[in-house]
Amino acid sequence: MYKICSLFAGVGGIDLGFLQTNECEVIYANEFDKYAVETYENNFKTKVDCRDIHDVKLNEIPDFDIMIGGFPCTSFSVAGYRKGFEDNRTGDLFFEMERIFKVRKPRVIFLENVKNLVGHNNGKTFRTIIEKLEEAGYKDKIRYQVMNACEYGDIPQNRERIYIVAFREKKDYDRFQMPLPIPLDNNIYKIFNFETKVSERYYYTPGKYKGNIYKLLEESMDDDSTVYQWRRKYVRKNQNNLVPTLTANMGEGGHNVPLIKTQYGIRKLTPIECFYAQGYPKEYKLPTNMSDARLYKQAGNSVVVPVINRIAINIIKSLK
Ligand SMILES: C[S@@+](CC[C@H](N)C(=O)[O-])C[C@H]1O[C@@H](n2cnc3c(N)ncnc32)[C@H](O)[C@@H]1O
């Protein structure tokens, strides 16, 4: 079994993609959002260290082979502040990973982030990340690629993310390749519940929200085979029958959760449907006592599990 150290673990999407190979075990996970930890621990046997990562000492982390982490992207995403490493609140979190990998030198480092990481600050942010990996001993042994979930994960979501894999050993790096695109066989009917009625609270009905949103939705949502988004003043129809990129702001209330039209009316996706749109399996269980706002945020913050799994399978092959 390859031992994994999972940082910024969230609800464990990256962990799950690696665990599904049946060749890995998570021996250390860190995440400071107690609600995400609750969801994580509802599904995995690893007990999460829920301290701020800045407070974790190196010698408190047991030995591991693979480090995984989708470090917070608020400072890099177009939707975020575009401040990158200068953002004191979250900008230094990559360096918290570096603090650990430069000493522990795991056999593999796996990083996931928003696509915009590459172009951020004229490419300087990304170059810094690569330089730090190189300085730690991973020079010329790093592969990265931007992949869209609908092309690489058989998941009908438009979600472009960068995946970075760094190897300590040249022979592992030489054997590794990023997954190739695969056809999209999956579709929204397979992952969302169009057949039965869900709880009333997810439906839009006349007079339920201010500003006569319902009328606008009803007029614009003419197609029950795709997913819509409310964009402050208008409704956006997503092309290609894909789910738009799920984001953490789904948890902020308002009308940020994507919408579908079903025979029972126009409604938001439910939290579990958002997890399914990230490729989580049916066995994944959400805590029953947690607010929708928290669950939406957790889903939006997470990853597309099948994309991670395809990369993880190739990583494990290259280590053998
Ligand atoms: C982009 S999310 C990662 C989500 C994860 N990949 C998943 O599949 O759910 C980043 C996570 O980092 C956590 N985080 C942010 N700052 C942290 C810190 N200083 N210490 C520990 N965790 C932190 C956030 O709470 C958030 O859950």
Image: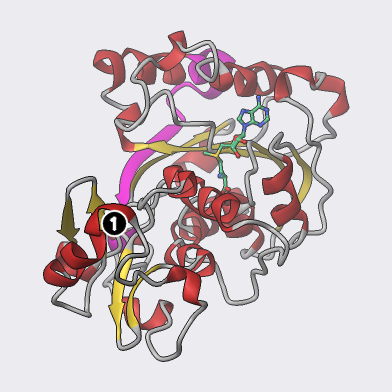
Q: Give the secondary structure at mark 1.
A: loop
- Foreground of the two, 3 or 184: 184
Whole-percent x, y for residue 289 in the image: 73, 62
Q: Which residues are magenta?
A: 132-150
Could you tell me which quadrant the C terminus lies in?
bottom right
Residue 157, image quadrant: bottom left
Give coordinates of residue 126: x percent, y percent.
Answer: 37, 21
Q: Amino acid at mark 1?
A: Pro
Q: Residue at x 54, y 42 (%)?
A: 172
**Residue found 61% across the figure and 56% down from its top:** 18
Answer whether residue 45 is magenta in the image. Answer: no
Q: Is residue 250 above or below residue 128?
A: below
Which residue is drawn at the image coordinates 59% and 50% (left, top)? 294
- The quadrant of the rendered image in which ligand 1 is seen is top right
Say if the magenta span includes residue 139: yes
Choose between 270 and 200: the one closer to the eye.
Answer: 200
| Along the line of sight, the residue nearer the viewer: 319 or 156 | 156
**Residue 225 image point, x, y percent:** 22, 79
The answer to whether residue 51 is above or below residue 133 is: below
- Is 201 above or below relative to 47? below
Question: Is residue 216 among what the camera can see?
Answer: yes
Name above or below for residue 91 compared with residue 46.
above
Measured as percent of width and height from the top left, residue 234 is found at 15, 52
Q: Give the left or right position of residue 312, taking residue 55 as reference.
A: left
Scheme by which the image is coloured: secondary structure
Q: Which residue is mark 1?
A: 244
Mark 1 crowd level (few <14, some 14–19, many ≥20, 10 Å Cα):
many
Is residue 1 in view from this perspective?
no
Left or right, 88 with respect to 260, comes to right
Q: Quadrant of residue 223?
A: bottom left
